[in-house]
Image: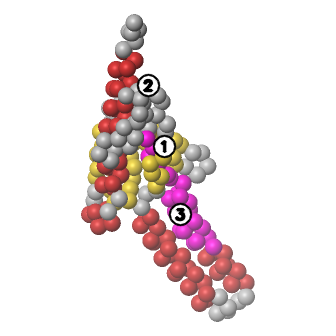
Amino acid sequence: MTQPVTLGGRPMMPPPGAPAEELLIARFRSQGRGLFWCALLLIAVCGATAFFYDNLPAGFENWMLLAAAGALILVGVVVPYSVWLSRTYTLTTRRVIVRQGMGARQRREMSHVRGYSIGVRRGIPQRMWGAGTITLTNGLDAPLRLVNIPHVTLVHEALADQIEVNQILAHRDAQTMGDTDPVA
């Protein structure tokens, strides 16, 4: 068999012995519903600042008001948004990659070829929004947690498909490597 084949909607498989290129399947972040309170705080601080500006008895108090509003926005809006923005999950045809951190980046990977178990936990609010937490464990490394993932069932199915395809390819390549008898 020298041509890539596809069976019932599965991805194209490379010929035996040929390296499979790594393709991006999905890149996503955790669900942003936790940023609701940050947005509400931003609206409230902007409204209160606009209301009280120039209504204070002394002129220097306007600068104090602006400084307090700026500090509230920095601590209550910018920092949580930056933390949310700094964590990304990447699903490729070879592995799952979790990147997190603002200054010092931390990166963890788990390969599909090694195989792992997939655990899905969904609380009541997560079910209402179609989200969930996926835990990937391979028995050797620390579990890899994908926290508050949107469309968790779709991500779960994609992970299960990638494990299956990668293990089939690894088994097939191991079989072709074992057949090194010269044909006369």
* Mark 1 or 2, closer to the camera: 2
Whether residue 108 is visible here, answered yes or no, is no
Q: Amino acid at mark 1?
A: Leu
Label 2 sits on a secondary structure element that is loop
Estimate the x, y position of residue 64 in percent, counting from the top left: 67, 79
Most common secondary structure along the magenta stretch: helix
Q: Residue at point 48% right, 46% down? A: 24
Q: CA distance from mark 2 to mark 3?
A: 45 Å
The amino acid beneath tag 2 is Gly
Disc 1 or 2, which lies upstream in sequence? 2
Residue 23's tag is: 1
Element type at marker 1? loop
Instruction: Please state the extent of the stretch shown in magenta in the rendering.
Output: 70-93
The x, y position of residue 162, in whole percent, is 36, 41
Tally the marks: 3
Q: Which residue is mark 2?
A: 17
Residue type at numbered disc 3: Tyr
| Residue at image mark 3 | 81
* Residue at x-position 49% and y-position 39%: 22
